[in-house]
Amino acid sequence: MSQDAQSRARSLAAQSAKVVMGSFVDPKDDMVRERARASFSSDELAGYLNGGSEVLQKRKQLIALMGQYSWADKRQRYHMTREEEYRGGVQAMLGIWQLMKEEKITQEDALEVRKALSLPGGLELHIGMFMPALMSQATSEQQAEWLPKAMKLRIIGTYAQTELAHGTFVRGLQTTASYDRDSQEFVVNSPSDTSTKWWPGGLGKTATHIILMARLFNNGKDLGPHSFIMQIRDLDTHLPLPGIRVGDIGPKFGYNGVDNGFIKFDHVRIPLNNMMMRFAKMSPEGKYTAPPPQNAKASYSALVYVRATIVEEAGWYLARSVTIAVRYTAVRRQTAAVAGGRELQVLDYQNTAHSLLPLLSTAYALIFMGKTAMQRYHDFEAARSNGDFSMLPDLHFMLSGLKALGTTLVSDGAEACRRCCGGHGYSMPSGLPTLFASYVQNATWEGDNNVLYLQAARSMIKGLAAVRAGKPAEGTAAYLTNAWQELSSTSRASCARDWRQPPVLIDALRHRAARLGIRALEKLQAAGHDQLQFEGSAWNDNTVDFIRAARAHSAFNLMQNFAESVSAVSKEGSVSGPASRALQLLVSLFGMFTVLSDLGDFLEDRYITGPMAAQLREEYYAVMQEVRPDAVALVDSFGFEDYVLNSALGRYDGDVYTALLEDASNSRLNKTEEGPAWHDILKPVLTAKRPQAKL
Amino acid sequence: MSQDAQSRARSLAAQSAKVVMGSFVDPKDDMVRERARASFSSDELAGYLNGGSEVLQKRKQLIALMGQYSWADKRQRYHMTREEEYRGGVQAMLGIWQLMKEEKITQEDALEVRKALSLPGGLELHIGMFMPALMSQATSEQQAEWLPKAMKLRIIGTYAQTELAHGTFVRGLQTTASYDRDSQEFVVNSPSDTSTKWWPGGLGKTATHIILMARLFNNGKDLGPHSFIMQIRDLDTHLPLPGIRVGDIGPKFGYNGVDNGFIKFDHVRIPLNNMMMRFAKMSPEGKYTAPPPQNAKASYSALVYVRATIVEEAGWYLARSVTIAVRYTAVRRQTAAVAGGRELQVLDYQNTAHSLLPLLSTAYALIFMGKTAMQRYHDFEAARSNGDFSMLPDLHFMLSGLKALGTTLVSDGAEACRRCCGGHGYSMPSGLPTLFASYVQNATWEGDNNVLYLQAARSMIKGLAAVRAGKPAEGTAAYLTNAWQELSSTSRASCARDWRQPPVLIDALRHRAARLGIRALEKLQAAGHDQLQFEGSAWNDNTVDFIRAARAHSAFNLMQNFAESVSAVSKEGSVSGPASRALQLLVSLFGMFTVLSDLGDFLEDRYITGPMAAQLREEYYAVMQEVRPDAVALVDSFGFEDYVLNSALGRYDGDVYTALLEDASNSRLNKTEEGPAWHDILKPVLTAKRPQAKL
């Protein structure tokens, strides 16, 4: 091109550019404006939510420290193959172990690093299940033999319970351990393909040992599932031991850094001493001693602990998705009403706000619920150490329902956040697909959510049956003592603004829970006999209504706890006035949204009338608009560093388009200009000389 | 082990096996039993739904033919890297092209092959957008130049419209094409990072040409978006032409076989003749002729066509997920009430049936809707060829709402199906994660669902405003002529069984749509001025209620069409009595479920009273139980071959556990027994001799 033509091109394009770029707003500027309009200090609230500003400070230091290690580099995260993810996950965990040794970071800090990294790997169950199982189920002699090796990483373990054909129903496991008195060994065997152990994390290619759950047989008698420790790989070669077929089960929706594995046993002998004998016992002569009752309670406690941690973490996971979506929709502008005018921030379309702001309030509600749940678990633990298990049933009741409700809200919420981010939300570097796909397993594992709702429903129905028999309900179910009186109550909201009052909203949710609980009890009675039957067709044919009741109960728990926690924060002055007011508005928003989402439940028995419902809806829109100016500050208050979110759309500075462009350079398809299909696939066709070719 | 010990082990294990396997039911046997209990012939219904049994026969032949080609092998599908998926997608499309040449298969058959293959690749937009755009927007001279090359695959094209910062709002695109009269060329330029074209399929590494949408500037005047054809890569080397930066945007949630790409222009000159001049024109002297009005209508038609195809396919996608989930939950057994008793089929838990059977009915409703939508599109096309565009607005109205409703139902339904399959639903070989992640983009592309609902709401509100001004509403909106009379109506259901009647359900959905439509009109008027304003804050601040109205309208459309279609099938005797009765039951189930899902909408104005709602709910449970025995036959009737589903859980024969085990052998982590982390990562730690190592 001539010099002349070139400069003409530049000048023409510059003239056009002036027009097309004239009304464009830099996302970074939008972000600055959003922060300037906040009514409170997000630094202050972030400090409070995270347990003190020093915690955040510490995390920043840890992230800086991680910057020195290649295993902590997240830039390739969305571009890795399955093998790379797996290797990365193992490397990261060993890296953290190294940090503890060399940088002398504490165990607490190591947990922070692991959380910031978000790359689960082959050692998750070594830490989370194998060692805890040894500690709780092995005798002290057994612990002395195995624990030091596990702690020194001389062996790596996992926990093998689930089988191809059995998950929920542990009593139905098909792997057998038959005691051979002659040799004083157990014969571990998989009698069928369906008995293949399937799913244990780290089992595929990492673990050298497992805690095995197998049905113990003695003299032909089925003694039910018991746990054993078992070496499965040679410690020098890492090859499977004789009689063992073990491997990776293949890719999953998410969590692909973890080598979830399978294992099948062909008459493998293990010594008598490999049975975990803290509770159940087998003598060399084949005398079996059943575990005392507290064993059941102890393993119950372990279950409850895991659910408490899931509830504790739920809100923080939703907070990640919400942070990304709120920040992005606050800087994404689309569609101008007037030609050449400024386009509107996507968060300012009412339907976007309606999708995101209630989820923002849900994240807060769940975070406060998580704090309470963990506190209640610790209270129980303190009592348990004195042999007092009395808190266990109510804790189990509460956590079953909240695990189900919380993980459903977070899973569905994560996907809703993703869809609010339009096309870019479909891109891996947005971070949102990974958040959803890796989180959603929580709706299934550690008790499928429907199964857990049904456990909560059982407690609820038992409680109501007791009340009807004249006994008061207790603990989480205390409100059921007045359940039948609830039936005739109606909402006391007398004007639109009343709907902002947490007590009005809590009353509504309590009323619904009581009503649906009674309905569930009646259903079970109508279907069953005089005695309540929590199994068989009386139970199985009515699970929809039971789940409805349990869900209503848990929603009431969640709202009540949110309101009470925020009220306590205000009273104690844990945060200053403006932050406290912002939180109170979120309580109203959450309660109103929760009632509106299931409005039929309240209209059906006229607890709320049609005109009241219309007022509630309009007031909800009004509260949503009051929350809107604080939206970015409220997500800033979760305190996530950019490193933690690892999202092109969730960047603190709002520079989203630059981030997307930068990440694209990591695409494996961009390794060469021509791409991976050119030389052997496309070129022969595109440059073919045959004129007869046609599509 | 001694011979003696070995035989003792075998005998002990065999004794135990007898106990643990005693009550186990082979999934294959369950499947046989499920089919035996069906009330109608699934072969017959499958033939009808697929357009004739000869269509199914033909597809089986095509699948057999595909068995000879490695590009059609799906066994590694869930294990591929990004590069492999991309190469596979290109290879497959070239393979189909080869089939057409060598096996002389028809274009229709080629489409069947493409659908059965389900591996979108870099040539999707060459076929779906590039060639159609040339055909509709190029002059005949331009077509003569480009089309033959495109058809012979001498060039590969795509359609480049969306930019980093602009998707929905096409008028806001920032790429400019400035006419340089001196050289009779356009200067194509990207004035900013945000103007980078982003998302076009095949743009990354496959396309040599693009149809470019850019803002045309002439003499400094902005003439708005126009289309151009542009070569972007050298045909011999496949390297980008000067001034062009092009590449892949990186991995996405799904659709990773496609190289969605980006492209940025640095003052690139293209000849005058590269502007698509069928409608708008530019003379060499720089005289611009605006397109005549039918151009807008023509591009409108293209939009409408794409939406019609999305609606046509929606039900079939949901049918895939439902087939997998129903088959799996019919053979998956879990939990026995009595020790040693048979465990229950998971589909026999009421909550599972409640999750899946309404989705089964939704798939049928959408399939019938798709048939109608495509029929209506063809009617329009026939009229259009005579210059009659009068059907366009109503078709656009109908399809906007149905695209939004349909793709939301299918996306959410796919994920619900996945969760019903428990842990194994999280595994890639179940096929469910891929179905969800690759389908859910439909909720965003070709008009984000909220944007489309708002388009439908606009038509609805305009229709209602016309009615109020004394004019009758027409077409899809005809029912709105009586909208105000609807306000005072109540349901005529007088007993539980009435709720099975399609007219009772259709009336309810019509009533709701009319009520919410009027509410939307009132909202817009309250917020705006005398004139209705479909923009600005009067519009943007009330989008939640507008979307509610449009959704209600579309749900009414969907139910009405389902009932009418099935009624016509029965009257015409297109299927025999038993199949027709099964379909009628699905109509009832779908309608009842739809009303129950939004019960508050009907209770709020007491169209349905509380006691009626309770009857509806119980009747719904009863219908669900009547559908249950036909569940497997109803999914068999979709007619999917195992090759098409490619799902370990959705196998026709029910042999799900064998399928999972087989697929695991393809896991890349299983290439070696030791796994990819042993030699350089794990071994040094596990075999370290340093005694001071600790966790």
Image (cartoon, coloured by chain):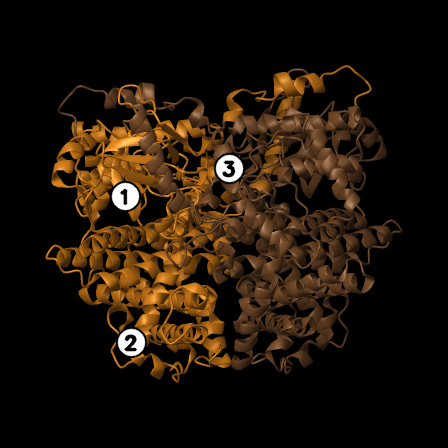
Chain colours: A brown, B orange
Q: Nearer the viewer, mark 2 or mark 3?
A: 3
Q: Residues within 10 Å of mark 2 (few under 14, many from 20)?
A: some
The CA distance from mark 2 to mark 3 is: 47 Å
- Check whether the beta carbons of the residues at disc 3 and disc 1 lie within 8 A of each other: no
Label 1: state its secondary structure.
loop
The CA distance from mark 2 to mark 1 is: 43 Å
The CA distance from mark 3 to mark 1 is: 32 Å
What is the residue that sits farthest to the left in this orientation? B386
* Quarter of the view holding residue A222: top right
Instruction: Say which chain tag 2 marks.
Output: B
Q: Where is residue A250 in the image (x, y as percent from the top left)?
A: 51, 32
- Tell me the tag on residue B466: 2
Amino acid of disc 2: Ala
Left or right relative to B247: residue A458: right
Q: How crowded is mark 3: few (under 14 residues within 10 Å), some or many (20 or more)?
A: some
Q: Which of marks 3 and 1 is in front?
A: 1
* Quarter of the view holding residue A260: top right
Placement of A353 over or under A415, stated as above or below: below
Left or right relative to A452: residue B629: left
Instruction: Say which chain tag 1 marks.
Output: B
Same chain for mark 2 and mark 3? The answer is no
